Image (cartoon, rainbow, N blue to C red):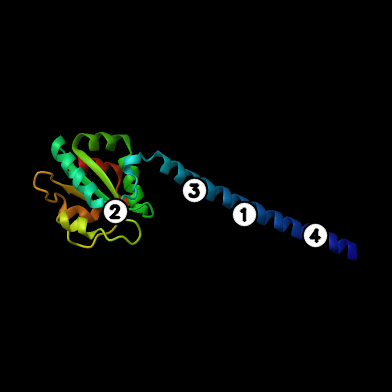
């Protein structure tokens, strides 16, 4: 009797543990697939649409504005960070083929990494946006006047992941 009870308990708990293990394995597979999908999306972003740390962000912004002026385009300055979900979404949308065409036609694009604790409000103030910013902050700058063209719309892009691609295309066209 003792032996049968022992076998029953081992068999029962073995099945329970096997079922729990299968559930755990399924959960890991689902989570792993989601993570893999996100990783693949990250890999599809083009290099210009990553937030790379630089030594002198203000000089890079000025350089982008000068380039835009010489090319007859608008300077698009995106202040964001790789740790920010919406900043990464902005980069992903900009990497879409339809957006590539729109951006190449009319913009000189610069992504500025705001890091974790760096204060880049001097850049926003210089460009005419003295308000404390969130990430990402997309500033469209007229290179002739140095004025901000999208003052009223800056906050739209701080929720970049919720904006459909079609709205990106319409807005920037």
Q: Is residue 72 in sight in this rendering?
A: no
The quarter of the picture where the C terminus appears is: top left
Instruction: Give the residue pinned by disc 3.
Output: 35
Q: Position of residue 101 (x, y in %)?
A: 25, 33
Q: Separation of disc 2 and disc 4 at Cα? A: 56 Å
- Residue pictured at 24% horizontal, 38% vertical: 103
Single out the mark in the foreground, 2 or 4: 2
Q: Separation of disc 3 and disc 4 at Cα? A: 36 Å
Q: Is residue 149 in sight in this rendering?
A: yes
Snapshot quadrant of residue 107: top left
State which tag comes first along the sequence, 2 or 1: 1
Instruction: Give the residue pinned by disc 1.
Output: 24
The quarter of the picture where the N terminus appears is: bottom right
Q: How many marks?
A: 4
Q: Quick check: 138 left or right of 148? A: right
Instruction: Give the residue pinned by disc 4.
Output: 10
């Amino acid at each position: 009797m003792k032996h049968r009870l022992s076998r029953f308990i081992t068999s029962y708990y073995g099945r329970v543990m096997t079922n729990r293990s299968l559930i755990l394995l399924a959960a890991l597979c689902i989570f792993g697939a989601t993570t893999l999908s996100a990783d693949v999306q990250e890999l599809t972003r083009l290099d210009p649409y990553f937030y790379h740390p630089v030594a002198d962000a203000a000089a890079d912004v000025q350089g982008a504005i000068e380039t835009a002026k010489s090319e007859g385009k608008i300077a698009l300055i995106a202040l964001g960070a790789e740790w920010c979900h919406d900043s990464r979404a902005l980069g992903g949308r900009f990497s879409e083929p339809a957006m590539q065409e729109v951006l190449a036609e009319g913009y000189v694009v610069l992504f500025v990494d705001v890091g974790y604790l760096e204060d880049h409000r001097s850049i926003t103030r210089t460009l005419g946006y003295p308000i404390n910013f969130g990430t990402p902050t997309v500033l469209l700058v007229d290179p002739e006047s140095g004025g901000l063209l999208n003052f009223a719309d800056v906050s739209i892009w701080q929720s970049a992941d919720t904006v459909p691609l079609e709205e990106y295309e319409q807005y920037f066209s």
